[in-house]
Amino acid sequence: MGGLLRFDRIRHWLHRRSFEKKLRSARSWPMASGEVNHWAVVDAEDDAMTTATPFQIEASFHFIVNGEYYGGYFRSVGLVHRQAETLATGNPTVNVRYNPADPDSAVVLAEDNESNLPFRIFSPLQDT
């Protein structure tokens, strides 16, 4: 059992490291205006959860580049369930960073969306 747990930790670390590298690169990508299509209140990921805030809002979005539709997902910081349900409404505009060589590779950065969403976006790079 110990070997499987160690493998899961390594896999999680590698995935997080890859995601953080993508977020750092995304800061230099062009920005497009997107729109939220759907909201869901979900169990918080381990990195975003505390005992007091065990839920997150997961939002799907779409944006258009060169006449083509692209999309993705982003999540809020950890929230209590009632707060998440209350804030997950409407179709706000989101600023999306996309890879110009591959617009399917897109992210919604917290620092690009501080004033246009009713909640903060979770990002493991918030302190960097």
Image (cartoon, rainbow, N blue to C red):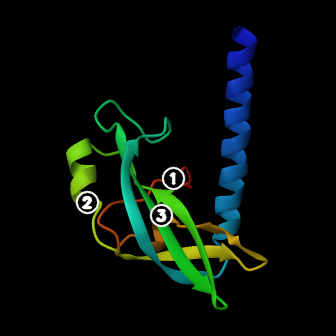
Disc 2 to disc 1, how far (Cα)? Answer: 24 Å
Of labels 3 and 2, the one closer to you: 3
Q: Look at mark 3 in the image and give the residue it sits on.
A: 60
- Residue 33 image position (x, y, % from top left): 50, 83
Q: Which image quarter holds the C terminus?
A: bottom right
> Badge 2 local density, few (<14 within 10 Å), some, or many (20+)?
some
Q: Which one is earlier in the sequence, the residue at label 3 or at label 2?
A: 3
Choose top left, top right, bottom left or bottom right for residue 8.
top right
Q: Earlier in the sequence, mark 2 or mark 1?
A: 2
Q: Amino acid at mark 3?
A: Ser
Residue 87 bears which disc, if any?
2
Position of 112 relative to 33 (above/below): above
Question: Where on the picture, by quarter, is residue 44?
Answer: top left
Contact, CB < 8 Å: mark 3 with mark 2?
no
Contact flag, marks 2 and 1 (Cβ < 8 Å): no
Disc 3 element? strand
Percent of width and height locating residue 36: 42, 71
Distance of mark 1 from mark 3, alpha carbons?
25 Å
What residue is disc 1 on?
Answer: 127
Left-right relation of 96 to 58? right
Graded by Cα atoms within 10 Å as few (under 14), some (14 to 19) or many (20 or more), the crowding at tag 3 reads: some
